[in-house]
């Protein structure tokens, strides 16, 4: 059955049969080059599956760990003191101001007594479900490269996102919906744009499919004819196309690629029916809609994305990525993402409330429906922010040296933490990288991150490059 | 178990070391073999020996150590010896060996003594260093003459294959088929063959007329004629250029977060088209692209060709925007890696980039060699440059002629009239050049300001501050009606502002001012002056103080007003005003980069006391709302002169203005986004690829795995272009077998769907093995014999029987033995690539625009932002219906129609397109607005050209180059019932597998 599902969504060029010549047997792994065959599950599956699917909340712009999840008593003491100006020159903006304590008070929460700042009053109630990684580090202080790194493991464009790798490895649970769905912030795309969910050198079928709820157009690009003709009028055209293709196919005995093309076409027709149902969040009860604050002018858009994510994973979508923030633009009253260079109270204040409402609703909802145990929820950003002010400004500069991500749900031991940053939150102590987070996510999905590979230009590529350690300390 | 004996050896050697101490302590002399080589072997050669050679360092033989020289040690000076620094370092990241304890004190002492005594390494190495078997890899071996196999006698075959006896390609293919127990397929139908050929060679299907002519042709050489016709077609270069641009990951924007446009990249794309069209010898094609500026510095074409090296992505934020040197180093490292990887994979199929962080895991390429190859590009930077040296020289000559005459006239005018520079006064001077350039006046305190400032806020919304200067009355932050002079005079008609200002009012550009240019004149240049006045700011002169200095009551104020903000695509602007006693005498609103030249000559009557120059914001006062006054002067008004003087001055000024117009009218030199040379930087081995872990310096050198290639003879003094020339010489050397093999394999892939080597940019040990190694070498040899003519190789392939085979044919043997068709027992069914689908739709719709060359068509709306936004629009205008090759390729924003069809991401080098089949793809070709539009255009054309009863026939002829079958005709007629029936039929045809695939 599994193969049939792949067939419908992801059928490749259909290279049937096995070649017996030694030439062709030489390197089975390399056979993926240029073709779109599926990898062999036995090559990389561990047999230990703790999560069936993933929802990742990505907070672009750089979420400040020292104001949110990473409690730094030493920073309170050092508040107002000078920071090393030489080190400050190496930062993105090139100038360090004075050390500054969190702009929100930290308190202990839950049975585990983990610290969280007052920016997240609702998420704080879920603290016993969350496992923090406080030692995250990035290799770039620039939004674009750091976004790419967090999504694909490489600070350069052109590499497949984690969702694309998972699509490549596992395929879909629902033949009528895409495997990897992306829900961008309705305010716009994140830094780096659509390449963040690109398939890189993997076959294009594995790239994230954007579902747009806010726009006037169809939720999936080209889902309906651009002239908006009623779908029943399409039937005569479809019938003729079927006739042409079947006649053409009959004259070409081994051409399985043609079967795949015919199947993909039928699949497209079914998607026209299944996609609208999946995204109809207004079918939800008033209570559910209220919990996600769908009508709130600020928190509503993200709340809707979170609600939609739940509906999608319920229907078997493998990987849903929600962006909580967009690209930087000038001339807005509030920054359109977390990139709080000039006024952290204003910008983190705004985005903190947005994240708090949507993410807490999502966790509660998943739990009530019994989905949290089999759904891995990840919340991350591309880098953190500095423990000092940016020059004379009221904001903080980029800090690739340390940031915090958290995970919850399938296979995660809540109320725990891995790693730490130094006493003021400037650098991670024994850094953890996206490789480790990715390795852990794949591990929970039953994938050995070192074995899920794809040949490209001389290298057997993988999501975690040559790195990656599963973070067992936060696993059940 | 396996390790046990080794462990014992280890213990023994420790003991012998201990013994060694006593020995050397006793007699005080070192024995290299006993005291030094044992250290190397025990602690170093596991990583720095024949097997790994980390960072290119080997300590297992004298010649390797000598090769590295001072990168290892400085004889006589342990402290200056990198090896000694490494073993004694306290930094665990830096210290060698990298295990926890490091060397013991005894070993360190001994190394110190040995280096201090001259680091003598006796000639005692065993000569029998085992040869690295990886050097025997087929791809590094020289091209050798290959005998063409004889085709088996006909009686040995089941059917007549006598046609297979003439073309050498067929001999090789038949030979391998027979040896594998296979038989070739019968030839394709003429209709199938011509469509295959036409799309392969031009990227467009044949017209129905061309098809009928060929099918009906009785000429014995009908096939050859078609091959010749299409090889000579003007569409040929446009088809093949796409393959090469994929390999070069060409795009028209930078990529990364701030994905700005490269407005001049297209000249390189056109160069590639022209090169294929003219069948430029392939070795010359490579030389031009790698080092055209060194081989032929006077030839425009050769300079444009270096756009190849610049074709890949470039990170504006990391390279230019951030002040952080660490981030810049990383960005430049990525840049060099990209250039090197592109050149080596494209030309030689060597995956050199795999040796960036460590030695190549599969190929015999060390990390040190990787960095030695970086050194070929260490002076090469991407950027716009003059594309045509001759044009540049001619224009410069003309410009100088005009400027010389202008200077002469200005000198003459200087003699005629006294004038005072207001910019000079702002710099603290008296108007005669005694002020300081760059100095300004603080807008709130009125005192001289040298350092640059940022945002200035007026506490009260507006402000006035007197200035201590003989001629200047005061400075202002204007906001609505406000005071502008010490007398309390108020300005009239000034708009409300934010009350924010920026920096100071300066004798020169203000902080972060982007431009001091008006027309062709840069006012920061000699003989000119800039008065920088960022919004919101104003400055007032007391003319009653100036008049005695000019000995005149009536004055003339002259200047040019320019916009100093971002020069391109800006969204900000500013207003400029000139006030006389607070009344507006001149207003220029909404100044922006596109504003025309504004020259002001304002007579000032004797009654006016205050002259005010004033700038107000277009947006927020701190964006780029900056203007400046070029050459602001006060002089006596000419009415006080005598008639003769005035006429002479007027005539000179007339001439000056004419010259200025001539200067402004001169065109700029054609630009191309290519390579700008700088002095090459010294390249070091970077430990683990990190620019922060700098190792030994290296000089440019080529790879050793190509043993027959002559070494590259350049050194650290060689200039950028000459370094690349040396590399190009090495790559195109007759002793280098790879470029010819790699390119004929790319041609083969183009015509058969899969190359003889199925990894066309990886001929290393990790790449595919050639299915027909002799054929590959024969083709490579043939390419060289025919003076590197690519068309000759294509001609050979296209006229072969192997190419002519049917793709529909099947055989049980074929499917059982070789389902992937690597032995080519038939042709392969292929899907059209993204660009060919789009071009073919335009072609059959009759809308394709055949304009060749020039800037790309932009089927998007562009929005200037910190990170520019590209929003695709449906290509609904004829100027957007050019061939897809001429698309302005936006790196970060994949194309909504082409990307689902596997048009690759230009962040990647793409030697071979993926071919996927997805529902999303079907949705694009079925529902996209562009397809519906083109189907409508096709229907309209058919309706115009044909009578109603011929519509269905015409649509099939255009789309499939054939007549509809009776069944198809009936089914299609049924669709024509509705108004848009014919358009619906056209849409079905272009979505059919018959249209989207080639047999």
Image: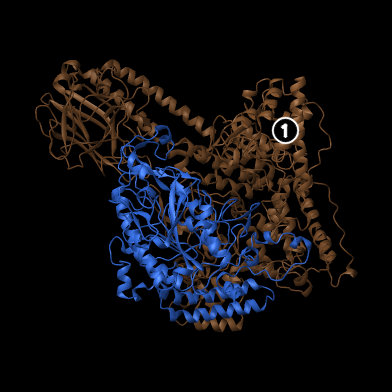
* Image quadrant where residue B99 sits: top right
Answer yes or no: is residue B757 visible.
yes
Relative image position of residue B420 (x, y in whole percent)? 24, 20
Counting other residues with Cα less than 10 Å from the Cα at mark 1, is it few (<14), some (14-19), or many (20 or more)?
many
Report the coloring of the rendering: by chain
Which residue does the numbered mark 1 point to in the structure image? B39
Pointer 1 indicates a residue of which chain? B
Q: Is residue B328 above or below residue A210?
A: above
Residue A342 quadrant = top left
Q: Is residue B652 above or below residue B220?
A: above
Q: Nearer the viewer, residue B602 or A123?
A: A123
Total residue callouts:
1
Which element is circle 1 on? helix
- Residue located at (68% from left, 28% from top): B106
The image quadrant where one finds the C terminus of chain B is: bottom right
Image coordinates of residue A380 in percent, x first then y, are 43, 55
Corner quadrant of residue B220: bottom right
Given residues A240 and B124, the one toward you in this image is: B124
**Nearest the eye: A167 or B565:** A167
Q: Is residue A125 left or right of residue B588?
A: right
B176 or A9, nearer to the observer:
A9
Compared to residue B506, the image places residue A331 above or below, namely below
Instruction: Answer left or right for B291 relative to B568.
Output: right
Q: Is residue A99 visible in this depiction of the protein?
A: no
Chain given the colour brown: B
Residue B287 placement (x, y as % from top left) = 65, 39
Q: Position of residue B836 (x, y in %)?
A: 57, 61
- Chain letter, colour blue: A
């Amino acid at each position: 059955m599994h193969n049939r599902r792949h067939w419908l969504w992801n059928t490749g060029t259909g290279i049937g049969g096995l070649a017996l010549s030694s030439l062709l047997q030489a390197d089975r792994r390399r056979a993926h080059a240029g073709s779109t065959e599926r990898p062999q599950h036995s090559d990389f599956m561990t047999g230990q599956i703790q999560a069936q699917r993933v929802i990742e909340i990505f907070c672009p712009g750089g979420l400040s760990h020292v104001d949110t999840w990473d409690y730094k008593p030493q920073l309170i003491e050092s508040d107002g003191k000078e920071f090393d100006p030489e080190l400050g020159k190496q930062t993105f903006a090139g100038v360090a101001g004075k050390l500054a304590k969190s702009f929100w008070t930290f308190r202990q929460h839950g049975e585990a007594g983990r610290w969280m700042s007052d920016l997240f009053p609702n998420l704080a109630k879920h603290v016993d479900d969350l496992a923090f990684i406080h030692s995250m580090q990035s290799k770039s202080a620039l939004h674009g490269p750091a976004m790419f790194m967090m999504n694909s493991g490489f600070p350069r464009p052109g590499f497949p996102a984690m969702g694309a790798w998972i699509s490549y490895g596992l395929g879909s649970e629902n033949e009528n919906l895409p495997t990897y769905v992306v829900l961008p912030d309705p305010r716009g795309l994140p830094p780096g744009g659509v390449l963040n969910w690109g398939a890189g050198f993997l076959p294009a079928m594995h790239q994230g499919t954007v579902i747009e709820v806010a726009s006037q157009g169809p939720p999936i690009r080209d889902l309906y004819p651009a002239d908006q003709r009623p779908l029943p009028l399409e039937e005569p055209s479809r019938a003729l196309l079927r006739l042409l293709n079947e006649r053409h196919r009959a004259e070409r005995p081994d051409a399985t690629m043609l079967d795949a093309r015919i199947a993909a076409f039928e699949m497209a027709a079914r998607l026209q029916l299944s996609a609208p149902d999946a995204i109809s969040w207004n079918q939800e009860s008033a209570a559910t809609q209220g919990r996600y604050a769908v009508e709130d002018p600020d928190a509503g858009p993200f709340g809707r994305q979170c609600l939609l994510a739940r509906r999608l994973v319920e229907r078997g979508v493998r990987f849903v990525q929600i962006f909580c923030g967009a690209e930087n633009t000038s001339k807005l009253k509030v920054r359109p993402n977390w990139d709080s260079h000039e006024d952290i109270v204003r910008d983190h204040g705004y985005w903190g409330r947005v994240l708090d409402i949507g993410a807490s609703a999502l966790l509660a909802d998943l739990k009530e429906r019994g989905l949290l145990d089999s759904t891995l929820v990840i919340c991350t950003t591309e880098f953190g922010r500095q423990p000092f002010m940016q020059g004379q400004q009221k904001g903080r500069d980029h800090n690739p040296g340390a940031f915090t991500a958290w995970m919850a749900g399938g296979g995660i031991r809540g109320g725990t933490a891995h790693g730490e940053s130094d006493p003021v939150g400037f650098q991670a102590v024994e850094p953890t990288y996206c490789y480790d987070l990715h390795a852990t996510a794949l591990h929970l999905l039953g994938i050995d991150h070192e074995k899920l590979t794809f040949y490209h230009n001389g290298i057997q590529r993988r999501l975690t490059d040559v790195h990656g350690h599963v973070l067992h300390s936060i696993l059940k | 178990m396996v390790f046990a004996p080794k462990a014992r050896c280890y213990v023994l050697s420790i003991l012998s070391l201990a013994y060694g101490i006593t020995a050397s302590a006793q007699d005080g002399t070192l024995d290299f073999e006993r005291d030094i080589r044992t250290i190397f072997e025990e602690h170093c050669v596991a990583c720095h020996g024949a097997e790994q050679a980390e960072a290119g360092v080997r300590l297992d033989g004298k010649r390797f150590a000598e090769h590295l020289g001072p990168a290892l040690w400085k004889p006589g000076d342990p402290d200056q010896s990198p090896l000694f620094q490494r073993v004694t370092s306290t930094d665990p990241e830096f210290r060698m060996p990298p295990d926890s304890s490091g060397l013991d004190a005894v070993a360190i002492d001994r190394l110190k003594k040995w280096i201090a005594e001259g680091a003598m390494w006796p000639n005692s190495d065993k000569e029998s260093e085992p040869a690295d078997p990886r050097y025997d890899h087929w791809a590094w071996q020289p091209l050798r003459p290959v005998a063409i196999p004889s085709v088996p006698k006909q009686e040995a075959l089941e059917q007549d294959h006598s046609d297979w006896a003439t073309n050498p390609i067929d001999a090789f293919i038949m030979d391998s088929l027979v040896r594998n127990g296979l038989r070739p397929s019968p030839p394709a139908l003429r209709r199938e063959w011509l469509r295959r050929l036409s799309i392969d060679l031009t990227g467009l299907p044949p017209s129905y007329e061309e098809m009928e002519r060929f099918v009906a042709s009785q000429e014995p050489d009908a096939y050859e004629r078609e091959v010749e016709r299409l090889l000579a077609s003007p569409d040929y270069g446009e088809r093949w250029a796409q393959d090469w641009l994929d390999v070069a990951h060409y795009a028209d924007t930078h990529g990364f977060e701030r994905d700005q446009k490269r407005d001049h990249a297209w000249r390189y794309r056109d160069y590639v088209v022209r090169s294929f069209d003219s069948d430029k010898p392939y070795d010359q094609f490579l030389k031009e692209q790698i080092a055209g500026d060194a081989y032929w510095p006077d030839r425009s074409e050769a300079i444009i060709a270096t756009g190849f090296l610049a074709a890949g992505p470039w990170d504006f934020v990391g390279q230019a925007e951030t002040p952080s040197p660490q981030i810049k180093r990383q960005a430049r490292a990525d840049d060099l890696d990209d250039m090197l990887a592109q050149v080596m994979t494209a030309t030689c199929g060597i995956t050199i980039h795999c040796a960036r962080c460590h030695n190549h895991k599969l190929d015999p390429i060390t990390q040190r060699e990787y960095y030695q190859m970086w050194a070929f590009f260490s002076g090469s930077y991407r950027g716009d440059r003059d594309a045509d040296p001759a044009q540049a020289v001619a224009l410069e000559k003309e410009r100088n002629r005009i400027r010389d005459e202008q200077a002469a006239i200005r000198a003459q005018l200087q003699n005629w009239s006294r004038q005072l520079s207001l910019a000079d006064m702002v710099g603290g001077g008296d108007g005669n050049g005694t002020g300081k350039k760059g100095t300004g006046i603080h807008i709130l305190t009125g005192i001289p300001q040298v350092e640059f400032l940022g945002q200035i806020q007026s506490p009260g919304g507006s402000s006035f501050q007197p200035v201590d200067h003989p001629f200047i009355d005061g400075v202002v932050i204007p906001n609505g009606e406000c005071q502008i002079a010490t007398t309390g005079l108020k300005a009239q008609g000034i708009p409300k502002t934010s009350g924010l200002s920026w920096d100071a009012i300066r004798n020169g550009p203000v902080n972060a001012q982007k431009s001091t240019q008006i027309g062709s004149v840069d006012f920061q240049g000699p003989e000119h002056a800039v008065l920088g006045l960022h919004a919101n700011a104003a400055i007032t002169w007391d003319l009653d103080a100036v008049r005695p200095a000019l000995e005149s009551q009536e004055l003339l104020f002259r200047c040019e007003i320019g916009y100093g903000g971002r020069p391109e695509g800006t969204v900000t602007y500013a207003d400029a005003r000139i006030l006389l006693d607070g009344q507006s005498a001149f207003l220029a609103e909404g100044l922006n980069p596109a504003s025309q030249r504004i020259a002001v000559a304002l007579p000032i009557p004797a009654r006016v006391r205050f002259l005010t120059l004033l700038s107000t914001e277009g947006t927020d006062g701190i964006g780029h709302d900056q203007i400046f006054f070029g050459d602001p002067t006060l002089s006596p008004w000419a009415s006080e002169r005598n008639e003769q003087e005035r006429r002479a001055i007027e005539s000179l000024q007339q001439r000056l203005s004419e010259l200025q117009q001539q200067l402004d009218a001169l065109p700029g030199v054609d630009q191309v986004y290519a390579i700008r040379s700088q002095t090459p930087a010294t390249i070091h081995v970077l430990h683990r690829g990190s620019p922060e872990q700098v190792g030994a310096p290296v000089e440019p050198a080529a790879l050793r795995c190509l043993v027959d290639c002559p070494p590259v003879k350049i050194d650290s003094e060689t200039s950028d272009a000459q370094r690349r020339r040396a590399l190009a010489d090495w790559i195109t050397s007759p002793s280098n077998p790879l470029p010819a093999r790699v390119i004929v394999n790319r041609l083969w892939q183009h015509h058969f769907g899969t190359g003889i080597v199925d990894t066309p940019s990886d001929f290393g040990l990790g790449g595919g093995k050639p299915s027909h190694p002799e054929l590959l070498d024969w083709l490579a040899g043939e390419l060289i014999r025919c003076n590197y003519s690519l068309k000759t190789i294509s001609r050979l392939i296209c006229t072969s029987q192997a190419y002519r085979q049917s793709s529909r044919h099947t055989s049980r043997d074929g499917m059982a033995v070789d389902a992937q068709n690597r032995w080519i027992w038939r042709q392969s069914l292929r899907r059209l690539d993204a660009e060919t689908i789009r071009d073919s739709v335009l072609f059959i719709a009759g809308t394709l625009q055949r304009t060749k060359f020039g800037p790309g068509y932009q089927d998007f709306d562009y929005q200037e932002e910190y990170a520019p936004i590209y929003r695709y629009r449906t290509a609904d205008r004829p100027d957007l219906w050019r061939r897809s090759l001429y698309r302005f390729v936006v790196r970060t924003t994949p194309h909504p129609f082409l990307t689902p069809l596997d048009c690759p991401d230009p962040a990647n080098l793409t030697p071979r397109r993926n071919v996927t089949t997805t529902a999303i793809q079907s949705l694009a070709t079925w529902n996209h607005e562009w397809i519906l539009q083109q189907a409508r255009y096709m229907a309209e054309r058919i309706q115009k050209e044909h009578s109603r009863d011929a519509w269905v026939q015409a649509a099939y002829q255009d789309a499939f180059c054939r007549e509809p079958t009776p069944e198809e005709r009936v089914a299609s007629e049924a669709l024509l019932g509705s108004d848009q029936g014919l358009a619906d039929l056209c849409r079905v045809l272009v979505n059919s597998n018959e249209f989207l695939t080639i047999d």
